């Protein structure tokens, strides 16, 4: 190539200009490193994504009835974390009709599903709406009593006991 006539020797460039130029080059390298790259071979997953939390109550209820045990397990685990994050989430979940499918899952053949179901019910019965919904469903208390005899999991029995205890604290005469 031809010689660059406009290039100034480094020793003649003011120090401030050299520092700013080096910072600009470092920024350019950082930007190049962090550019958006294409997602490698996207494959569908069984997991409940965090992105669905905006419509979580309805999606959780939908996933509870899924035939795949892995999806039910993942939905219950994510639901537990979501319910722990805010007390408002508990009443939202109850209003979406979660107690009915949860009541059915209490008798699921999978131990992990039963364990996670009782954990969710223990969280839901911590709010007034949850207790009302459990009392409004004729199968919830009998199923919780059956789960109290679960030989597979101490955690399941503990969570069921906690739910029954919270239901028992319900103000007398308030049930319809």
Image: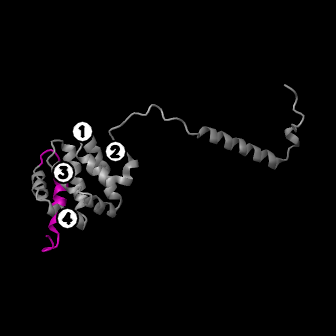
Q: For label 3, count other residues whose C-alpha is less than 10 Å away and answer few (under 14), some (14-19) or many (20+).
A: many
Q: Residue at x 22, y 40 (%)?
A: 67
Residue at position x 36%, y 58% in the image: 85
Nearest the viewer among 117 and 11 is 117
**In the displayed structure image, the side of residue 131 where residue 27 appears, left or right:** right
Q: What span is in magenta?
A: 150-176
Q: Which badge, 1 or 4, is on the more N-terminal residue?
A: 1
**Residue 68: image tag:** 1
State the SS at label 1. Answer: loop
Where residue 44 appears, x then y in whole percent? 37, 35
Q: Earlier in the sequence, mark 4 or mark 2?
A: 2
The x and y percentages for residue 130 are: 22, 63
> Dividing the image into 4 quarters, which one contains the C terminus?
bottom left
Query: Relative to the observer, which residue lies in front, 129 or 78?
Result: 129
- The reply to whether the magenta stretch includes residue 21 is no
Mark 4 residue crowding within 10 angstroms, few (<14) / some (14–19) / many (20+): many
- Label 4 belongs to which residue? 131
Q: Is residue 173 one of those drawn in magenta?
A: yes
Q: Which residue is mark 2?
A: 48
Query: Where does label 3 land, which residue?
Result: 156
As helix, strand or loop, the secondary structure at mark 3 comes to: helix
Q: Earlier in the sequence, mark 3 or mark 4?
A: 4
**Position of residue 175 measured from the top left corner of the image (x, y, whole percent):** 14, 70
Pointer 3 with pointer 4, Cβ within 8 A: no
* Marks 1 and 2, how far apart at CA: 12 Å
Element marked by disc 4: helix
Q: Residue at x 23, y 57 (%)?
A: 97
Image quadrant containing the N terminus: top right
Is 56 on the left-hand or right-hand side of 6? left
Residue 132: which numbered mark, if any? none
């Amino acid at each position: 190539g031809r010689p660059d006539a406009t290039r100034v020797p480094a020793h003649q460039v003011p120090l401030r200009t050299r520092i700013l130029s080096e910072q600009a080059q470092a920024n350019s390298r950082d930007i190049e490193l962090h550019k958006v790259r294409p997602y490698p071979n996207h494959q569908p997953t069984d997991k409940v994504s965090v992105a669905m939390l905006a419509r979580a109550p309805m999606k959780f209820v939908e996933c509870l009835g899924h035939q795949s045990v892995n999806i039910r397990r993942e939905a219950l685990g994510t639901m537990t974390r979501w319910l722990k994050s805010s007390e408002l989430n508990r009443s939202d979940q109850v209003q979406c009709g979660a107690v009915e499918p949860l009541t059915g899952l209490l008798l699921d053949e999978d131990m992990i599903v039963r364990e996670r179901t009782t954990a969710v019910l223990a969280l839901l019965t911590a709010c007034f709406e949850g207790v009302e919904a459990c009392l409004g469903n004729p199968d919830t208390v009998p199923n919780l009593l059956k789960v109290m005899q679960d030989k597979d999991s101490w955690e399941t029995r503990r969570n069921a006991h906690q739910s029954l205890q919270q239901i028992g604290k319900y103000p007398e005469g308030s049930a319809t």
